[in-house]
Amino acid sequence: MGSGGSSGRGTRLASAEGPEGTEQRLEVRKGKVPEALWAQRGVQKLYLSGAGLREIPAELGALRHLRTLALDGNELMEVPDALCQLPRLAHLYLGRNGLQWLPAAFAQLQSLRCLWLEGNFFAHFPRALLRLPELRSLQLGDNRLARLPSSLPSLGSLRGLWLYGNRFTEFPPALLLMGQLRVLDLDRNRIAAFPDLSDLTNLSLLSYDHNPVHQPPRVGDATRLVGDGAQEFMEERQQRLQSLQKQEEEEEEEKEEEEEEGTAEVPPVVPEDDCPLLENEEGDFVALPGSPEEM
């Protein structure tokens, strides 16, 4: 994310952005960030992607206004404690490193909304993530996950979850309780059967490509599918929905016609036995002589 490329052997370009949107180019030499960066306390966005970093200095924790941090494509084997001390951090990119776990202190990132951890070595779902209530987007593709914790639905703000390229052999049951999900990517796993997912009414995209399934998962009418047989399924569904819509429109037209026919002719007034009426020369109805109105 956001790396600037290379300007020579052993030198990488990175960038930092301040509160007024001004961008500053940085030269990362031999995997070391220039010391001058840490004195810029107002930095809000820092892009150190593909910079050859193996560690992050403790001075990172002094950038208290940092909202976006890109450290993807480096050689980090663990998340530094300094990173967990950034109270305003909302977007964090740690993909394509050598991470296997997250420290408990990671849960201190209470402002975190978007987290990318793809291309690492997670064999277990990081428990610290379950304590991040504002997390909306979680990218865990290309790891080694085989199951998800039953407490995953506690992430009530989560809208997008990417789990492609892992080791799931069955659909994680916890996902059935996450009705708020909008995007779910399970490509390239080993799932042979999917449960009925039609109760996930907010799901707008389900990707299940390259799984050993024999038929598309059952989903709601508003969910777009990506995978083997998905195109035929969605075409048939579209035809069915169009047919239902046409049928509803025809029934509505018939109902309107019946209502119009019912109001076109007003039926004549039929006198009741206890109140005999007589039509006079002006076409008005008057009571017959001797009727209760004359008495």
Image (spheres, grey):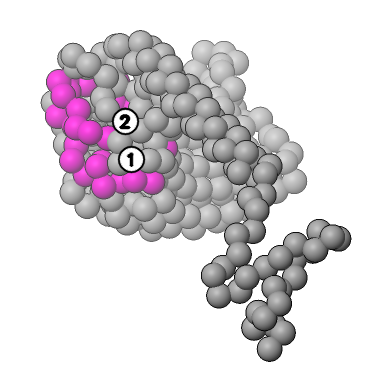
Q: Is residue 166 left or right of residue 291?
A: left
- Residue 183 in magenta? yes
- 233 relative to 145, above or below: above
**Residues in magenta, as a range:** 170-197
Q: Secondary structure at mark 2?
A: loop
The residue lying furthest to the bottom in this view is 295
Q: Which mark is residue 219?
A: 2
Report which quarter residue 79 is drawn in. top left
- 242 relative to 259, above or below: above
Q: Amino acid at mark 2?
A: Val
Q: Is residue 194 visible?
A: yes
Q: Position of residue 59 (x, y in %)?
A: 49, 50
Q: Earlier in the sequence, mark 1 or mark 2?
A: 1
Q: Position of residue 23 (x, y in %)?
A: 70, 35
- 68 relative to 253, above or below: below
Q: Position of residue 203 (x, y in %)?
A: 39, 36
Q: Is residue 171 left or right of residue 120?
A: left
Quadrant where the C terminus sits is: bottom right
Q: Which mark is residue 200?
A: 1
